[in-house]
Image (cartoon, grey):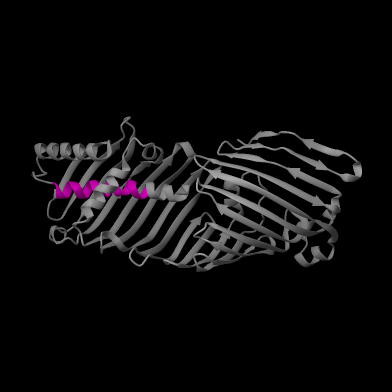
Amino acid sequence: MTSERRLGAIVATGFGVLIAVGVTAALGFRLWLGSQRGQRAVQQRLDTWVAQKSNGRLHVGKISGSLVSGVRLDSVELYDRKGRVALRAASVRARYSAAQVLAGRPVLQVDVDRPELDVDALTSGEIDLESLTRVVEHEGERTRRFTLDKLMVHDGTLRSPARHQSLTHVELEARATLDQENRLGDRGAMSLLSMKAYWHGAHGGAPVGASGTVRWSVPDRRLDADALTLRVGQSHVQVRGDVRADEVDLRLATLSLAPEELLLFAPTATPPRRPITGEGRAVGPLDAIVVRGTLRPDHGEVQLRGRLDANEREGQLHLLLDRVESDFAPVVVSGVVALRGKLEEGGGVAWRAHGSYQRREIDPNLQVGKLGVDARRRFALARPGGHFSGSGRAVFGEGVRMKFRLEVDDPGQAARLVAGPDVVLPSRTLHLRGTYVKPAAGRPSLVVRRVDTRAE
């Protein structure tokens, strides 16, 4: 499971625990909630249930409501076995109809105020999330249809100190429907009507937002995505399409990466002056998915063509560079790159690549940034191109480790580069071993045995 999917599952489970606690409290009431004695009894039963099912400990400051129409829990805190607060909320309110619950078709409205979720605590293994999931699945066997008519989250927070990331000021509105065929959830739909928050990373932050609808059918082995949209600052991406048992049709409807957001993930890079835009599509049977896409940097175009085999988890891609030019570098580049890759069982990726390129250099004295595209290219001087080849492997675990070898022959510069970088993330360490040779010099002009650098 990728880090993004894992984080999504953790977040969903976290809010699911809050919802499950509220529903369990409502259905388990045997005492009048207005009395202190009744509240203590319900609190003890909830705490015992959570301890048995998850190895955690639950504290609820106050319980109020009605068995018939809904329940409210105030000052909710879930602790792991080490006593850390993994999940807390100022209040959780669940509104429902007892008649619909007894009929096996519950309809809920859930409102969560100021939830705080510690992703690191939930992923440490000190809380048994798998057992909680099994309990929810078991209880779902008695339900023919479950409708979450509305889920509202106000001023939520998700934190991961280990990853130096957090989401704050989360405002979310969603709804979902789960139907039972063999088990609850075999068919369903989930709509994220609105999600707004502020993302904090190691190198800054940006406002984020998301929306869209997903529908699925396990018996039909089908998943449909309708206008799934993610926004980060001025950047955004939208995906549409469906995945079936034996074929896929996914469309990257829009893609726009703004320079400001690129700097958040690569703070030492020189960003383009304008957003990188593009679109793409992947369509066909799972063993022969055709991939086509286009990226537009500052100037020029990058076309992506290829074929993927989802069953064997391998594929080949071709990148066509058509007069690609950046505002920050006085060079126009055209070329082709052929890439083959395969996903490995252990969570890694192995790849091989080769290609060639041609370039035209622009006189830097012409003040590149002030000239139009056509004017700059009229003054560009043709230079001999070159070719390259390489291979490598990336392993994904707690972090990312990449090792590869790259060889570049550039007759225009009368030079040859052989490099073998070893990149480790998130330690941000680069080990570089390589040789840069100008044959005309008769001997290597630069030999790099090892370079260790840390970008703080």
User: Residue 273 location, x and y as percent?
Assistant: 67, 56
Q: Is residue 170 magenta?
A: no
Q: Which residues are magenta?
A: 11-28
Find the residue positioned furthest to the top.
82
User: Residue 57 location, x and y as percent?
Assistant: 25, 35
Instruction: State left or right for residue 400 relative to residue 430.
Output: left
Task: Using the image, determine if residue 228 lies above or below residue 400.
Answer: below
Q: Answer with the quarter of the image where residue 214 lies.
A: bottom left
User: Residue 5 location, x and y as percent?
Assistant: 44, 51
Residue visible at 24% across and 47% down? 135
Q: Is residue 22 magenta?
A: yes
Q: Answer with the quarter of the image where residue 213 lies.
A: bottom left
Residue visible at 31% across and 54% down? 152
Q: Is residue 75 something one can see in this rendering?
A: yes
Residue visible at 91% across and 41% down? 442
Q: Main secondary structure of the magenta part?
A: helix
| Number of dots carrying numbers | 0
Q: Answer with the quarter of the image where residue 84 lies.
A: top left
User: Residue 39 location, x and y as percent?
Assistant: 13, 39
Q: Closest to the observer: 110 or 251?
A: 251
